[in-house]
């Protein structure tokens, strides 16, 4: 539930003195402006549809079906990643054509962004590791899918396959590839749910 002050309710998953990753339980209205601001960083590559509105924040952050995390640096939100069930994308032909559509075994990475000035600090990598680890723990989830610029997916990773290509993705004039990551092939997992606590690269993970 959102607090009376409009602040978000979150659960800290990993942290250092200045950086932390939080699992969203309920996004509060106080964080809407920052989430919308950060989403503007996605528009250049992913098109205007990637920019959040108040309605889309409610839809993708505040639902039990989604898997949202935010990253904070010195208490300021600097990025986020959100996974949603493939079946939520009923208006997308590429989703309907996915062989796993309707099997409820796939999370689609709807958005993944870190503000530009923080990208070289390893925070994006840590955020993604947390996301993948928690996704793997979800009941029935065997795959993660998403869209990235063509040539971006790590095809050297045996767990990742390119499923299809989308030309002029979302009107951007750019070619994107639709990839699938299989947990059946194994995924490096170093993030544990409580009560376990470990230290990885000086980041405390709960």
Image (cartoon, rainbow, N blue to C red):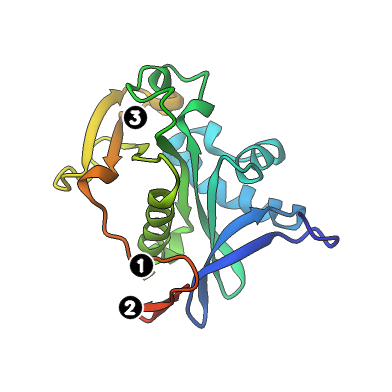
**Spatial distance from mark 1 to mark 2, Cα to Cα?**
10 Å
Classify mark 2: helix, strand or loop: loop
* Residue topped by disc 1: 122
Of the 4 image quadrants, the one containing the N terminus is bottom right
Is there a contact, CB below 8 Å, between mark 1 and mark 2? yes
Q: Is residue 135 visible?
A: yes
Q: What is the number of callouts on the image?
A: 3
Classify mark 1: helix, strand or loop: loop
Mark 2 nearby-residue class (10 Å; few <14, some 14–19, many ≥20):
few
The circle drawn on residue 174 is 3
* Residue topped by disc 2: 201
Depth check, mark 2 against mark 3: the one in front is: 2
Q: Residue at x 84, y 62 (%)?
A: 5
x and y percent of residue 16 in the render? 48, 79
**Spatial distance from mark 1 to mark 3, Cα to Cα?**
26 Å
Residue 147 picture quarter: top left
* Mark nearer the N terminus (2 vs 3): 3
x and y percent of residue 183 in the render? 28, 45
Along the viewing direction, whichever of 74 and 195 lies nearer the viewer: 195
Q: Residue at x 33, y 66 (%)?
A: 190
């Amino acid at each position: 539930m959102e607090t009376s002050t409009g602040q978000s309710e979150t659960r800290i998953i990993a942290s250092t003195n200045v950086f932390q990753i939080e699992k969203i339980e309920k996004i509060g209205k106080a964080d809407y402006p920052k989430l919308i601001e950060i989403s503007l960083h996605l528009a250049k590559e992913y098109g205007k549809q990637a920019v959040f509105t108040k309605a889309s924040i409610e839809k993708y952050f505040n639902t039990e079906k989604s898997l949202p995390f935010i990253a904070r640096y010195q208490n300021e939100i600097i990025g986020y990643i959100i996974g949603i069930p493939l079946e939520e994308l009923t208006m997308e032909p590429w989703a309907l054509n996915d062989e796993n559509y309707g099997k409820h075994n796939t999370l689609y990475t709807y958005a993944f962004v870190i503000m530009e000035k923080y990208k070289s600090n390893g925070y994006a990598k840590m955020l993604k590791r947390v996301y993948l680890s928690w996704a793997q723990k979800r009941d029935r989830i065997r795959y993660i899918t998403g869209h990235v610029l063509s040539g971006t997916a790590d095809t050297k990773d045996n767990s990742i396959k390119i499923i299809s290509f989308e030309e002029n993705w979302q009107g951007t004039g750019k070619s994107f590839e639709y990839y699938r990551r299989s947990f059946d092939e194994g995924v490096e997992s170093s993030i544990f749910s409580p009560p376990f606590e470990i230290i990885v690269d000086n980041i405390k993970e709960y």
